[in-house]
Amino acid sequence: MNFNEEQIERYSRHIILKDVGVEGQEKMMAGKVLIIGTGGLGAPAALYLAAAGVGVIGLVDADNVELSNLQRQVIHFTPDVNKPKVISAKEKIEAINPDVKVVTYHTKVFSENITGIIKDYDFVIDGTDNFAAKFLINDACVFAAKPFSHGAILRFSGQTITYVPGSTCYRCIFLTPPPTDAVPNCSQAGILGAVAGMLGTIQATEALKFLIKKGELLQNRLLTFDALDMKFREVAVTRNPRCPICGENPSIKKLIDEAQPVCSLKNKNKKT
């Protein structure tokens, strides 16, 4: 890949990095990353991947921008309220870096469509806010041997782990979704906006490390943090031989859609 003068200047801070250099920047520009959910986690992840020059960024989200999103979903601005999130995010990505190709999917992920959506991407970022989507993303990526970054936030806390084929998957740790309403979501319990930025940028970093094949990914390691006390904890995890999808005798043979009602401060039947 031949860089033009503008690209050399734009990516100069990567190019001078010993573990990135020209070769690493070329890998980023040839890379394809899918972000499922352009909210609190997906917003900062998308901005940093775009700034880094990732060649293709896919955005999946069925929602429109709401005023309550703006407290943490930094890719959306006040004039974007009521605009589809994928369109709002695409506009910001193209504004920050015209080198990037943005592919939008204005839809939720379901068992019927997720395999077709993820198949052309090198790495997947889970930026969703509900257990049904998180288990579906895990299962689809395990079946497709597709690496992905799991992320979850609530109040002042966050957690993340990176899956690569053969490593510990999300279901190895959390076998099944919790009972309905057993765990509150951000619209019920709240979230410090900057916490979303902290975790989203970690997920973006994992994607970039994967593309350039440098460093150690968070595979077989669950990273958690409490921003209120600013304490980080890393827990070593191993593949669960009883995991229903990647264990010795898997019981999940096909993708399923878990039931997941999501509550809102405004309307208990409305998704946020």
Image (cartoon, grey):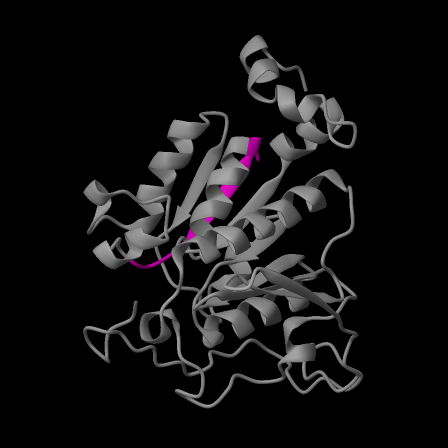
Q: Position of residue 253 (x, y in %)?
A: 64, 81
Q: Please say whether residue 119 is visible from this viewpoint.
A: no
The residues colored magenta run 52-63
Q: Residue furthest front?
A: 229
Q: Residue at x 33, y 59 (%)?
A: 62
Q: Position of residue 150 (x, y in %)?
A: 59, 63
Q: Is residue 5 above or below residue 52?
A: above
Q: Does the magenta segment cover residue 53?
A: yes
Quarter of the C terminus within the rendering: bottom left
Q: Position of residue 144 (x, y in %)?
A: 66, 62
On screen, residue 231 versus residue 88, left or right, reads right
Q: Is residue 95 magenta?
A: no
Give whichever of 64, 234 is nearer the camera.
Answer: 234
* Residue at left offset 47%, top offset 51%: 197
Q: Position of residue 254 (x, y in %)?
A: 59, 78
Q: Is residue 135 visible?
A: yes
Q: Is residue 99 above or below residue 191?
A: above
Give the answer, above or below, for where 10 lies relative to 221: above
Q: How many labels sit on residues?
A: 0
Eyeballing the image, is 159 above or below 214? below
Taking the spot 67% from the left edge, 78% from the top edge, the residue there is 173
Q: Residue at x 64, y 72 (%)?
A: 170
Q: Quadrant of residue 78?
A: top left
Image quadrant assignment for residue 172: bottom right
Front residue of 186 and 209: 186
Quadrant where the N terminus sits is: top right
Task: Say left or right for 254 vs 214.
Answer: left
